[in-house]
Image (spheres, rainbow, N blue to C red):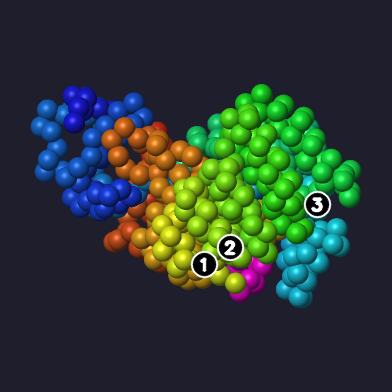
């Protein structure tokens, strides 16, 4: 292995949860050069000639890759706590939407907000995730449902990345709901997305991937298929909200397009599982929405495991069905509600989440050459990250090789 004689920083006295076939590595060290992992291994094997500009003693901390939240809708305006009360009173997701609530309620507030308004309201949600150890974050559009508002959302997502120093991957979700201007004209709306909005936003460099809501209250598989054909022509990867409330065959359809992920999946069929396994499509589990909506049908975890489909976990941070800004809490929920093991939950928010965003060659595991995004956790064992609910463990977050200030609550 070739390694530089001088590195920018060296972290010693740590244990590594690598998220590779190497597994856990105790009494280890990790070197960083130019924002990349330059060397890692047992501290006893540290090359004697290696020099570091900075040395950090980890004090027995566990090092994991930086956490990755691969499914969020955190850029929006307004609040939907009234729907929370309505659902506690027995109203269903579809009933709330039929009353003018749901996604369209947030659309009205988001359309009325300026770009700076959106940044001001959304930044605290992103900061909560970043402070907890998230170093890569996906943010979807889909609450504008008109070109100017969708553009504002995607621009704000990019600004959040610059403001916080996190990697933000943007996803165009114009096919989130049917805007009022296109009432009873869903096919016309999809045509507009394909012929006008998506090409324009992609040309502006605002889109990293394309998503859609494939559901009886969303868009049909055929309509999503049209959108994905356009995305592929533009060189953009696709993913899908699939089988959340019913089995629409969306997982099979997105797999046919080589989709990065299919997300939710409570009603996923054996055929959908087989298609995802063949395509390498990641199953993104969203326990926050499952919990918030009082769902009882659990995604087919055992069948997904048996088929070798990678399992990712995300917050699904959104105002209506998962107002969750803690990926550690989502990991706990995935264990308690879906039966994941702590080992699976950590992989689900690192290497498998990276696969769900198409960035696993660059991050999601601790390997020489990968981006030096990692977190030092002062815990006894990695399972502790899934164990407790509440304030995150004491930690140091490193992004592109630079240690971030520890939040005041932790320093105290």
Q: Find the distance from the CA under tag 2 to the CA under tag 3.
A: 26 Å
For marks 1 and 3, the one nearer the N-term is 3
Q: Is residue 199 left or right of residue 286?
A: right
Residue 176 vertical position relative to residue 338 in the rendered view, above or below:
above
For marks 2 and 3, the one nearer the N-term is 3
Q: Residue at x 47, y 66 (%)?
A: 303
**Which residue position holds label 3?**
104
For marks 1 and 2, the one nearer the N-term is 2
Asked which secondary structure carries label 1, the reply is: loop
Q: Is residue 270 visible?
A: yes
Q: Residue at x 58, y 42 (%)?
A: 257
Q: Nearer the viewer, residue 224 or 402?
A: 224
The image's mark for residue 66 is none
Disc 2 or disc 3, which is closer to the eye?
A: 2
Q: Find the distance from the CA under tag 1 to the CA under tag 2.
A: 7 Å
User: Which span is picked out in magenta?
Assistant: 290-296
Query: Percent x, y for residue 79?
Result: 74, 55
Mark 1 Cα-neighbour bin, 10 Å: few <14, some 14–19, many ≥20: some
Give the quarter of the image for residue 66. Answer: top left
Query: Percent x, y for residue 406?
Result: 42, 45
Q: Residue at x 48, y 39 (%)?
A: 358
**Which residue position holds label 1?**
300
**Which residue position holds label 2?**
268
């Amino acid at each position: 292995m070739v390694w530089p004689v001088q590195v920018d920083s060296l972290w010693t006295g740590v244990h590594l949860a690598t998220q590779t076939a190497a597994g856990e590595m105790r009494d280890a060290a990790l070197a960083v050069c130019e924002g990349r992992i330059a060397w890692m291994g047992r501290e006893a094997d540290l090359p004697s000639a290696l020099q570091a500009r900075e040395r950090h003693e980890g004090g027995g901390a566990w090092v994991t890759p930086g956490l990755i939240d691969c499914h969020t809708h955190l850029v929006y305006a307004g609040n939907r706590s009234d729907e929370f009360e309505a659902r506690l009173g027995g109203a269903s997701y579809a009933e709330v939407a039929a009353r003018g609530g749901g996604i369209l309620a947030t659309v009205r507030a988001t359309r009325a907000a300026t770009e700076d308004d959106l940044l001001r309201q959304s930044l605290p949600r992103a900061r909560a995730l970043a402070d907890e150890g998230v170093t890569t974050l996906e943010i979807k559009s889909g609450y504008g449902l008109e070109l100017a508002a969708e553009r504002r959302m995607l621009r704000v997502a990019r600004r959040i990345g610059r403001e916080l120093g996190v990697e933000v991957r943007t996803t165009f979700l114009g096919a989130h709901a049917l805007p009022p201007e296109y009432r009873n004209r869903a096919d016309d709306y999809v045509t507009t997305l394909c012929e006008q909005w998506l090409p324009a936003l992609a040309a502006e460099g605002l889109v990293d991937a394309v998503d859609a809501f494939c559901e009886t209250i969303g868009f049909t598989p055929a309509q999503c298929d049209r959108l994905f054909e356009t995305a592929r022509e533009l060189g953009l990867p696709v993913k899908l909200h699939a089988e959340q409330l019913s089995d629409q065959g969306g997982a099979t359809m997105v797999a046919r397009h080589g989709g990065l992920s299919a997300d939710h999946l409570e009603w996923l069929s054996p055929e959908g599982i087989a298609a995802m396994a063949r395509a390498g499509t990641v199953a993104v589990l969203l326990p926050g929405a499952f919990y918030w909506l009082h769902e009882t049908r659990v995604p087919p975890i055992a069948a997904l495991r048996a088929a070798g489909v990678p399992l990712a976990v995300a917050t699904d941070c959104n105002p209506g069905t998962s107002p969750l800004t803690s990926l550690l809490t989502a990991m706990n929920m995935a264990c308690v509600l879906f039966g994941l093991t702590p080992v699976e939950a950590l992989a689900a928010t690192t290497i498998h989440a990276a696969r769900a965003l198409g960035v696993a060659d660059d991050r999601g595991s601790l390997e020489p050459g990968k981006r030096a995004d990692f977190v030092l956790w002062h815990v006894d064992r990695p399972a502790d990250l899934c164990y407790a609910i509440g304030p995150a463990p004491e930690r140091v977050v490193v992004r592109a090789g630079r240690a971030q200030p520890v939040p005041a609550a932790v320093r105290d």
